[in-house]
Image (spheres, coloured by chain):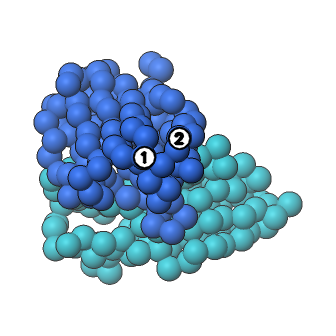
């Protein structure tokens, strides 16, 4: 069965600095999708970034980028130039070949002014 | 597009009562998911539908929970009878054939 692990329950970063959130997953599939979602205090789940496993190039969305290591089954999220509005819960998610999505336990990110 | 719509946003009910949560997915999306979020258990997938057909309901906690999708634009999650341990935020999400899910704002359920 597929699993998603986020080993950092909490992280903090100084405003304008860079932070990396870790995610590892376990699967026997070769083709799948990975996502990072953000959940601010408003509790609305917002997609941050998406990565297709068959693409070697790491996805980027403005200040957000991923380091996708398929062999290591690792999918970390880097946030550059952190802003106060980045403070939120971040969830790593894996989409299986049959379209089920499995979420990790989340990492709570605090941004220090 | 209005996004995924859930109602009610907040629900407070007494133990033993029936609770019905509603969801309107984004038009054109083939998939609909129901999640439950608690501090203890995180985000749990309860059930998901493809083209109105339930595909995987293995996450539904017990027989007190049921979900339906009578058409492409509406789904319900029902709890009968409700218990205090059902208190949580319930999310509905929809997605196109592949790719990311679009979440609704959630329903905060409190069972006293």
Q: Quadrant of residue A32?
A: bottom left
Query: In this rendering, which labeled residue sits more in front, label 1 or label 2?
Result: 1
**Could you say where residue B12 lies in the image, as x and y percent from the top left?**
57, 40
Residue at point 16%, 56% (across, down) = A97
For the point 55% across and 33% down, the residue is B9
Split into 4 quadrants, where in the image is the N terminus of chain A?
Answer: bottom left
Q: How crowded is the residue under tag 1: few (<14 C-alpha within 10 Å), some, or many (20+)? A: some
- In the image, B90: left or right of B45? right
From the rendered image, report the letter of the chain displayed in cyan.
A
Q: Colour of chain B?
A: blue
Disc 2: CA contacts within 10 A as few (<14), some (14-19) or many (>=20): some
Task: Tell me what residue is drawn at x 46 percent, y 30 percent.
Answer: B6
Query: Which residue, given by chain and number where applicable, does mark 1 sit on?
Result: B16
Above or below, A40 relative to A79? above
Instruction: Name the residue tied to disc 2.
Output: B13
Which chain letter matches label 1? B
- Residue A111 numbered mark, or none: none
Mark 2 element type: strand
- Would residue A63 be visible to someone looking at this image? yes
Q: Is residue A95 visible?
A: no
Disc 1 element: loop
User: In the image as oriented, which residue stretches furthest toward the front?
Assistant: B16
Compared to residue B67, the image places residue A27 above or below, namely below
Displayed quadrant of residue A19: bottom right
Q: Give left or right: position of B66 versus A28.
A: right
Nearer the observer, B5 or B99: B5
Q: Residue A72 in the image: x percent, y percent?
A: 32, 80
Asked whether the residues under marks 1 and 2 belong to the same chain, the reply is yes
Pick whichever, A90 or B108, lies toward us. Answer: B108
């Amino acid at each position: 069965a597929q699993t998603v692990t986020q080993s950092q329950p909490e992280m903090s970063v100084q405003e304008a600095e860079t932070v990396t959130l870790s995610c590892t997953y376990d699967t026997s599939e070769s083709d799948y999708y990975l996502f990072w979602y953000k959940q601010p205090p408003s509790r609305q789940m917002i997609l941050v970034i998406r990565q297709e496993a068959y693409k070697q190039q790491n996805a980027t969305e403005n200040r957000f980028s991923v380091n996708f290591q398929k062999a290591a089954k690792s999918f970390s999220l880097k946030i550059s130039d952190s802003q106060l509005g980045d403070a939120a819960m971040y969830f790593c998610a894996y989409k299986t070949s049959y379209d089920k999505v499995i979420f990790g336990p989340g990492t709570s990110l605090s941004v220090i002014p | 597009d209005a996004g995924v719509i859930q109602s009610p946003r907040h629900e407070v009910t007494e133990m033993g009562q029936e609770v019905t949560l509603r969801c309107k997915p984004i038009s054109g999306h083939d998939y609909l998911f129901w999640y439950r979020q608690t501090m203890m258990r995180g985000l749990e997938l309860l059930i998901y539908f493809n083209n109105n057909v339930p595909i995987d309901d293995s996450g539904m906690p017990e027989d007190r929970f049921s979900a339906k999708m009578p058409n492409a634009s509406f789904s319900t999650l029902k709890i009968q009878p409700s218990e205090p341990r059902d208190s949580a935020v319930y999310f509905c999400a929809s997605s196109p054939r592949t790719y990311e899910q679009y979440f609704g704002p959630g329903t905060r359920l409190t069972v006293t």
